[in-house]
Amino acid sequence: MKKIGVIGGLSWVSTAEYYKRLNELTNERVGGLSSARIVLESVDHQEYIEAVIDRQDEAAASRQILNAVKIVERAGADFIVISCNDVHRFLPEIAPQIEIPFLHIAEATAVAIEKLGLRTVGLLGVRKTMEGDFYPKAFDQRNIATLMPNDLERTYIDDKILDELNRNKFTKETRAGYLEVIDSLAKRGAEGIVLGCTEIPLLLSPDQIPIPSFSTTELHCVAAVEHATSGNRG
């Protein structure tokens, strides 16, 4: 069984969910008392926020992630999973500096969307994810169009992630607000919705969303376990 290198802490809330699902899925796939082989490096979220938001220093934020990646590489990880969507924007510059591969969250999501035959999806996440290019690039390769919320909606989604979801706070009011944004995207042509922040699936379950939804947390964990346990299935 391959060892999964997990970069966590951004936030600890979704990192805990990753650890739980990676082990549950491994046990389901392999059987017995099997659990995932994981090496975890947890980044200080406050230091990351200070770099990205307070100082707007993308280079400093990227160095934080690179340092974490090198730690799990030295600890024997066979491949790396980052339990945070927006950090994936740094992979083009980080990947050439290490010897082991990344399992990209956007690629795992794109595969699932393609399997359902959808051609247009809405994207929720922090502002840098919604306004970034790593999801549209992954989707474009499979002829999937990406819709993002309008500016006011993006501000609302981003604020609630930072002020509530990252702090393990999930309210009915925020759930209703997110569903309004999803409804708006559906009216604009979204056939499905990508929960492109690893905390959003803890706020919204598939049965609460009126169109097909894609939990990037779940899809990423499934892909990681399939990769780690190939050849070890019970």
Image (spheres, rainbow, N blue to C red):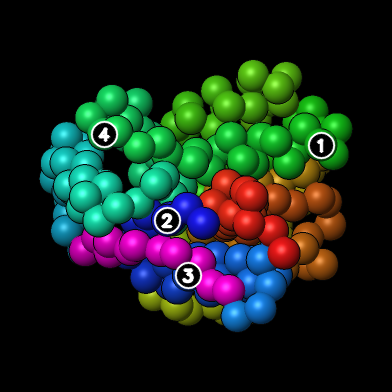
Q: Residues within 10 Å of mark 2 (few under 14, many from 20)?
A: many
Precedes in sequence: disc 4 or disc 1: 4
How many labels sit on residues?
4
The amino acid type of the residue labelled 2 equals: Lys
- Which region is colored magenta? 34-45
On the image, the x and y values in percent for residue 180 come to: 70, 57
- Which numbered tag is attached to residue 232? none
> Which residue is tagged 4?
98
Say if mark 4 contacts mark 1, CB within 8 Å.
Answer: no
Residue 164, located in which quarter of the rendered image?
Answer: bottom left
Precedes in sequence: disc 3 or disc 4: 3
C-alpha separation, residue under disc 3 versus residue under disc 1:
26 Å
Residue depicted at 55% across the width and 65% down the height? 22
Residue depicted at 72% across the width and 64% down the height? 234
Q: Residues within 10 Å of mark 4 (few under 14, many from 20)?
A: few
Q: Is residue 201 visible?
A: yes
> Which residue is tagged 1?
115
Callout 3 secondary element:
helix
> Which residue is tagged 3?
19
Callout 1 secondary element:
helix
The amino acid type of the residue labelled 3 equals: Tyr
Precedes in sequence: disc 4 or disc 2: 2
Callout 2 secondary element:
loop
The amino acid type of the residue labelled 4 equals: Ile
Q: In the rendered view, does 41 fall on the left or right side of 88?
A: left
Foreground mark, 1 or 2, reads: 2
C-alpha separation, residue under disc 4 versus residue under disc 2:
16 Å
C-alpha separation, residue under disc 3 versus residue under disc 4:
23 Å
Precedes in sequence: disc 3 or disc 1: 3
> Which residue is tagged 2?
3
Precedes in sequence: disc 1 or disc 2: 2
